[in-house]
Amino acid sequence: MIDAPSTVITVENISKWYGSVVAVNDVSFSVEPGITGLLGPNGAGKTTLLKMIEGLASPSDGSVTIFGQSPRNNPDLYHRVGVMSEHEAVYGFYTGREFIEFSAKLHGLSAYQEAADLAIERAGMTEAQGRALGTYSRGMRQRMRLAAAMVHQPEVLLLDEPLNGTDPRQRIEFHDLMRQLASDGQTIVISSHILEEIETLADRILLMVSGKLAASGDYRAIRAKLDEQPYNVRVVADDPRAMASALVELDSIESVSVADDGEVIVLSKNVELLQRSVARVARDRGIRLLRVEPLDESLESVFSYIVEG
Amino acid sequence: MAEIFRLSLRQLLGRWRVSLIVLLAALPTLLILVVKLVGEEAIAFDGEFVDPMIDGMIIGGIMPVVTMALATAAFGNELEDRTLYFLVLKPVSRINIVLPKLLATLVIAGPLVVASGVAATAMAGGELKAMLAMAIALSAGVFTYASIFTWAGLITPRALAYGLVYVLVWEALLGTFLSGIRYLSVRGYTLALLQGIDSESFDVLESRVIEFPAAIVGAVGVTLVFFVLTQYRLRTMDVP
């Protein structure tokens, strides 16, 4: 494969297996500047794949390059690459500030204090920088780890589940920061098992399922494909048969079935419309609605549509 | 390298670990004090003292256990806490990660073990040369053990348990009956260095030590081999 001029990361036929367990199976793709989302359910192989890209693990087969160089046993490459691992462990005895300065010094930055100032400010942790990491909340630790990953202003940022433990406000700030870095020309790969976390952020997504690359490309195209698929919704009411017969008349419904335990399972292509209609129908018919919940909320289900579709 | 050295010192100087190894290192001094206070006969620096106290307790027990407790934790803690990636994902060569980790172990274990041995020798009436021999031999022993157990901490999370088996079974048990094993034993090197430097004070060891040059070559060789192996392991392992 010949890299396009702007290709930063190239993954070629990469596989990783542990004994008889295949964690990543013959995956190939390339990453260009901008934000790439690596999506997949837990156990899909995202972390293993990222570790091979980061140089933390050796591929059983295939190859990875960043800027044309193998990341494995290539310490100099980390001048240009920043990594935030999935593990939330930190050196608890360091203050946030000490931790970032430690990272800056290991990167050989002579102006390590200025670099730490900037990274901490960007992560929104200026006020808490003097506290020991061991006293931080999960979200604060994540932000300080992000600051450590970008303290040397790398050209490539590899972030494994960076939004774990963050609150909605922190997520918005994280999105803003990532967009800013991407607009500066950085290459950012963000892994997540939650679609909503990066659906509005990533320019391009890579979908991993069971160790394989199930789909890749523009998020909106994949989302459109997802939207074509009907979703299952469970409706629990005090009179399931009456509820089922009322629901079947709605336009948004593909099919309705009543399970042995009395739960009504509804297949709908328009879950939003269904959510609005079901309460009205129950009220009009005098049915007591106990619970409404989507059965296909998990990413596993969403991915299965793509893989099987 | 200084940053990783300082980090390693802070990691290794955890309260429970330090308390334990200080207590262990102080054990010979405390024992001698007790014997001096309640014993009827004065303690003399002779075969009856060197055998159980110097060979058995300090070189056979305290030196390996204190060094092992620190050296296995040098990388073991990083692996257990899953923080090793912080270090290996930096533009730092592997030797500049391994060396400060090893030095941090030596800076803590060395003075403790040497102080333990020299104090015991002094309290029993050993001469200055014997104390010097103790300091040199114990330093060499700590160095060699530290190199082995730093590597072991990177290989297995049960390094401490395997280390104890090595010390008790290989060095203490088999080393007593099979003289050839002393050529592949840190305890064997330490005793040979001790006896080689001060043959008069430690003449009781003469019949069971290997040749002095062999001990030097063995200690240096084993230290270097495991130092290189640790770097190799760090280069080739999948970091969790």
Image: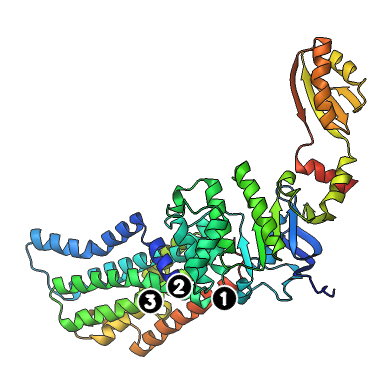
Residue density around tag 3, few if under 14, some if 14–19, many if 20 or more, within 10 Å: many
Q: Position of residue A46 (x, y in %)?
A: 71, 55
- The tag on residue B31 is none
Q: Mark 3 vs mark 2: same chain?
A: yes
The residue that label 2 is drawn on is B148
Residue B201 appears in the figure: no
What residue sits 19% from the left and 75% below the top? B47
Residue designated by label 3: B143
Residue B213 in which image quadrant: bottom left
Q: Is residue A212 left or right of residue B11?
A: right
Q: Quadrant of the N terminus of chain A?
A: bottom right
Q: How many marks?
A: 3
Quarter-of-image position of residue A58 = bottom right
Indicate the amino acid at tag 2: Ile
Task: Please tell me which residue is depicted at 8% across the width and 68% down the height of the picture.
Answer: B42
Q: Closer to the camera, B39 or A41?
A: A41
Mark carried by residue B232: 1
Question: Element at badge 2?
Answer: helix
Residue A80's spot in the image, x, y percent?
Answer: 64, 71
Point out residue B93 in the picture as x, y percentages from the top left corner.
55, 77
Please give left or right for residue A188 compared with residue B5 in the image.
Answer: right
Mark closer to the chain start, 1 or 2: 2
* SS state under label 1: helix
Sequence-wise, which precedes: disc 3 or disc 2? 3
Say which residue appears at 23% left-offset and 63% top-offset: B26
The Cα–Cα distance between marks 3 and 2, rounded to whole angstroms, is 9 Å
Numbered disc 1: what chain?
B
Residue projecting furthest to the bottom: B213
